[in-house]
Image (spheres, helix red, strand yellow):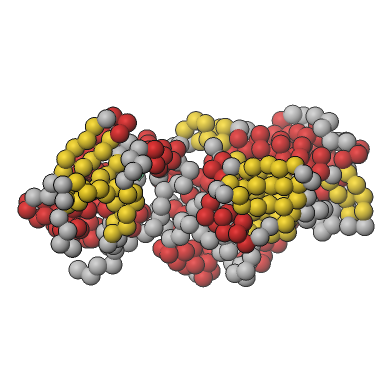
């Protein structure tokens, strides 16, 4: 399939939480700029990890934070809460996959400073297979000419698309 | 919550480190960028490119008014929520006359319904003779369904608004504030001056909200586009002018907050003094932050958010998700 859309990490993550959100993101329909939860997210990554390199752009993805640890690159993804931990793990694996495709070996760490939690993430061969089929699935989905209708799910209440979806 | 900043004095606006800085006759004031949504300039203010670059980076719009209180223009920083997809959709609905008419009619409908709600409110408070005006507006509105040209639609909208305005003397009922007839450029009496000022404020408020969406303000549907001016904000403002500006004017006058001394006559027409502009803006800000309940979204939606939601509704119409139905006030 022709690659019309750039599947970014944020789209992968969104796809797992809410497909509609992934579709909107792919069209650059970004969320409300003044949603308080977005602001909090920004503040958290500014507040913590002051000494690490932050927001590194790499091959269409934005890495929250990178650091060298024992000769291996460590990629950190910072989240506000463990609420959508699975989606965040997949997003992180997607970054590791992108790096892997560029011959960079890296490990991942999901960081939730507010809850003082971290989770190690490594990329296995099964993960690579899963990610490739997920990308295929996402591309197929994004080629739809309109997004699926909004459905009230748990994520809606704190979602920065809330006003847009329910207007 | 970010807030607009209003500058009435003369002086210099600068960037100082990572903050905005206003200097005026020895008085210096910092304007924190993270709390500022937009800046209104009424005084004579000097600024430079470095300052404008900083505003762009901070995503802050600048609105200029001349010393008579007329809107001059805006510094609209590069869009930061650009969506090629949405712009194509906007253009598609502009270029296809049927699609354009659908949206343009929706704006006229929203404006008409809200004007009517204003009159009905005053009718419920005992001004019976307003019924005649409401009837006439109904008749005028009825003819829009068959219309197939934007120009005719605009003319009808103009007629409805004229009927609506001609009822103002009944509502205001104050000899100091006789409306008589609508005069713009320049407004010839106090009430016309207030309407012009209020409407200009409304246009810039909607423009500021458009800046925070994916819409391009240059593509309007009712107001014809020449791709150089902002027009979408004029379309959307039609809906909110009656319920925000006109009601505000009635309330200010009935509370005796305005005196004839607040106005100045000049060969340019009737002018509003700074003190009165400040009072008006104060009241307007209060009104914009008043919260109401909105279907689907729930409680505590401010009027300012309501404008944003209206823009989202338009985006959804353009995307083909949900036909646009303009907001009509309940009371
Ligand atoms: S508000 Fe709900 S439906 Fe809309 S994008 Fe967010 S999670 Fe998805």
Between B250 and B87, the one lying in front of the other is B87
Q: Residue at x 27, y 30 (%)?
A: A116
Q: Is residue A23 visible?
A: no
Decide: is B155 above or below B304. below
x, y percent for residue B128:
78, 34
Residue B196 in the image: state x and y as whole percent: 77, 51
Q: Residue furthest front?
A: A70
Q: Is residue A37 above or below residue A99?
A: above
Outermost residue, left direction?
A: A125
Position of residue B244 measured from the top left corner of the image (x, y, whole percent): 67, 41
Q: Mark yes or no: residue B28 visible.
A: yes
Is A122 displayed left or right of B143 in the figure?
left
B96 sits to left or right of A83? right
Dividing the picture into quadrants, the one containing residue A49 is: top left
How many marks overall?
0
Which residue is pictured at 16% across the width and 51% down the height? Answer: A71
Give the image quadrant in which the ligand numbered 1 is located: top left
Q: Quadrant of residue A128?
A: bottom left
Q: Residue at x 81, y 56 (%)?
A: B184
Q: Residue at x 45, y 66 (%)?
A: B88
Using the image, determine if residue B104 lies above or below residue B286.
Answer: below
Q: Nearer the viewer, residue B70 or B1?
A: B1
> Residue B225, percent across and down?
61, 67
In the displayed structure image, the side of residue A164 where residue B293 appears, left or right: right
């Amino acid at each position: 399939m022709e690659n019309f859309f750039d599947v970014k990490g944020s789209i992968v993550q969104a796809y797992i939480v809410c497909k509609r959100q992934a579709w909107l993101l792919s069209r650059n329909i970004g969320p409300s700029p003044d949603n308080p939860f977005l602001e909090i997210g920004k503040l958290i990554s500014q507040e913590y990890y002051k000494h690490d390199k932050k927001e590194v752009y790499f091959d269409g993805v934005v890495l929250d934070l990178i650091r060298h640890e024992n000769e291996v690159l460590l990629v950190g993804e910072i989240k506000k809460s463990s609420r959508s931990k699975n989606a965040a793990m997949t997003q992180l694996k997607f970054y590791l996959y992108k790096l892997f495709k560029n011959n960079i070996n890296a490990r991942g760490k999901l960081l939730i400073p507010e809850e003082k939690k971290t989770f190690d993430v490594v990329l296995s061969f099964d993960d690579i297979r899963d990610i490739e089929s997920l990308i295929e699935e996402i591309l197929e989905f994004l080629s739809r000419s309109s997004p699926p209708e909004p459905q009230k799910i748990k994520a809606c209440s704190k979602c920065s698309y809330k006003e847009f979806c329910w207007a | 919550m970010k807030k607009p900043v209003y500058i009435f004095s003369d002086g210099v606006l600068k960037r100082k480190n990572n903050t905005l800085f206003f200097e005026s006759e020895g008085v210096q004031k910092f304007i924190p960028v993270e709390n500022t949504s937009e800046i209104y300039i009424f005084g004579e203010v000097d600024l430079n490119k470095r300052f404008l670059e900083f505003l762009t980076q901070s995503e802050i719009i600048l609105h200029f008014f001349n010393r008579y209180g007329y809107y001059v223009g805006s510094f609209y920083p590069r869009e930061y929520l650009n969506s090629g997809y949405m712009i194509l959709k906007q253009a598609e609905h502009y270029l296809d006359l049927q699609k354009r008419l659908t949206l343009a009619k929706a704006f006229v409908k929203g404006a008409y319904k809200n004007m009517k709600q204003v009159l009905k409110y005053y009718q419920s408070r005992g001004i019976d003779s307003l019924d005649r005006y409401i009837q006439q507006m109904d008749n005028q509105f009825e003819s829009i369904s068959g219309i197939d040209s934007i120009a005719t639609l605009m003319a009808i909208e103009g007629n409805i608004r004229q009927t609506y305005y001609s009822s103002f003397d009944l509502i205001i009922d104050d000899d100091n504030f006789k409306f008589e007839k609508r005069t713009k450029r320049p407004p010839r009496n106090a009430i016309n001056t207030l309407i012009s000022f209020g409407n200009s404020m409304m246009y810039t408020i909607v423009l500021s909200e458009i800046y925070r969406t994916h819409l391009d303000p240059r593509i309007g549907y009712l107001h014809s586009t020449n791709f150089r001016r902002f027009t979408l904000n004029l379309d959307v403002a039609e809906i909110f002018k009656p319920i925000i500006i006109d009601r505000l004017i009635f309330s200010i006058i009935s509370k005796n907050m305005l005196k004839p001394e607040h106005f100045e006559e000049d060969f340019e027409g009737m002018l509003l003094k700074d003190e009165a502009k400040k009072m008006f803006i104060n009241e307007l800000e209060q009104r914009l932050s008043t919260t109401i309940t909105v279907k689907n979204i729930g409680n505590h939606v401010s009027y300012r958010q309501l404008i944003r939601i209206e823009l989202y509704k338009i985006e959804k119409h353009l995307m083909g998700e949900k036909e646009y139905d303009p907001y009509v006030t309940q009371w």
